[in-house]
């Protein structure tokens, strides 16, 4: 009798521990109020080579400022780590994939612009910075020096749009992703590659021959989480979580972790 009883007690406490271990910070909402592709899980499209914003680590796990911030926001909405799935894609495919329902959201330092808002809706902005020309040629110091030079851009980025509009004397070369562009830069088939500032800084640290030659402010296009047009409840919940993360210092801690040495921008700090 005693033996049976204690076995039952043991079973109950094991079950209890298991339940506690999987319980999210906040209960996930019942039903599918956020109109998720797969109810109960947020599917996120991202890119694998924009370190420190978003990248895959040695184990193939996605990591970076944007990834950690999104995980934190999702947790506040009731979706723990196991209920947020990240999938890497070419940057140019991200917004169409959100629009056509392949992903619930895209998270990859995606600047909010009017043309993009025709395709998807965005959360509020969570990061603003510079677009940077990473150069393999010491002679490239300003925009005029790009005349006749081969400049790499990732297809579909703000860098591509900006370069075609303003670097009109440069020879623009499209790449599917940053790794392809930087490989071309290192092998000498292009002279410079145009990407986000913090990613340029990473590649500059990794490859000593590369320098950050030109910085273009992109503060009018802060990065946001892209969501399917009209997915109002999802967008509102993301914004609520985002504001909480800014107010309680989480955003600040992530910024300090991933962008050491960069000045702390007042816009996103606790008020
Ligand atoms: O517009 C900037 C923003 O101010 C911040 O610096 C983060 O990057 C941006 O959103 C621009 N990012 C590029 C874009 O949106 C490239 C993103 C990528 O390569 N993953 O097209």
Image (tube, rainbow, N blue to C red):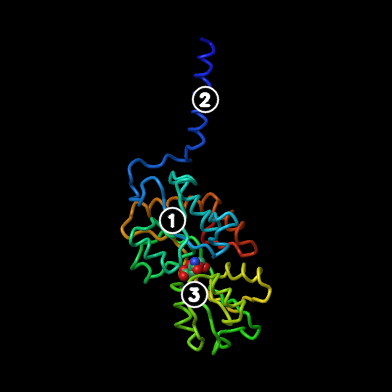
Q: Is residue 271 visible?
A: no
**Circle 1 is placed at which residue position?**
44
Q: Which mark is residue 175?
A: 3
Q: CB atoms at circles 3 and 1 under 8 Å apart?
A: no
Q: Residues within 10 Å of mark 1 (few under 14, many from 20)?
A: many
Estimate the x, y position of residue 100 in percent, counting from the top left: 33, 61
Discs 3/1, front: 3
**Circle 2 is placed at which residue position?**
13
Q: Residue at x 39, y 65 (%)?
A: 95
Total labels: the figure holds: 3
Look at the picture and state if 175 lies above or below 266: below
What distance separates the C-alpha of mark 2 from that of mark 3? 55 Å
Instruction: Report the front residue among 168 and 46.
Output: 46
Q: Residues within 10 Å of mark 2 (few under 14, many from 20)?
A: few
Toward the right, the furthest residue is 208
Q: CB atoms at circles 2 and 3 under 8 Å apart?
A: no
Q: Is residue 245 visible?
A: yes
């Amino acid at each position: 009798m005693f033996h049976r009883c204690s076995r039952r007690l043991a079973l109950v406490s094991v079950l209890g521990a298991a339940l506690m271990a999987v319980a999210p910070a906040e209960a996930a909402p019942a039903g599918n109020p956020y109109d998720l592709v797969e109810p109960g899980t947020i599917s996120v499209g991202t890119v694998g080579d924009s370190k420190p914003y978003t990248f895959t680590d040695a184990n193939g796990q996605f990591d970076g400022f944007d990834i950690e911030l999104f995980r934190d926001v999702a947790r506040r909405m009731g979706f723990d780590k196991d209920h947020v799935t990240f999938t890497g894609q070419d940057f140019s495919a991200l917004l169409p994939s959100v629009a056509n329902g392949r992903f619930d959201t895209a998270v990859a330092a995606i600047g909010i612009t009017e043309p993009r808002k025709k395709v998807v809706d965005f959360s509020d902005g969570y990061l603003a910075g510079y677009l940077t020309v990473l150069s393999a040629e010491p002679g490239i110091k300003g925009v005029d020096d790009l005349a006749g030079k081969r400049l790499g851009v990732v297809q579909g980025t703000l860098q591509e749009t900006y370069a075609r509009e303003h670097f009109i004397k440069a020879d623009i070369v499209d790449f599917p992703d940053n790794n392809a562009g930087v490989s071309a830069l290192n092998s000498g088939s292009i002279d410079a590659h145009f990407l986000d500032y913090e990613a340029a800084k990473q590649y500059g640290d990794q490859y000593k021959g590369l320098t950050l030659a030109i910085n273009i402010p992109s503060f009018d296009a802060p990065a946001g989480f892209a969501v399917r047009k009209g997915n109002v409840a999802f967008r509102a919940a993301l914004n609520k979580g985002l504001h909480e993360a800014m107010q309680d210092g989480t955003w600040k801690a992530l910024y300090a972790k991933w962008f050491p040495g960069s000045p702390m921008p007042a816009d996103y700090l606790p008020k």
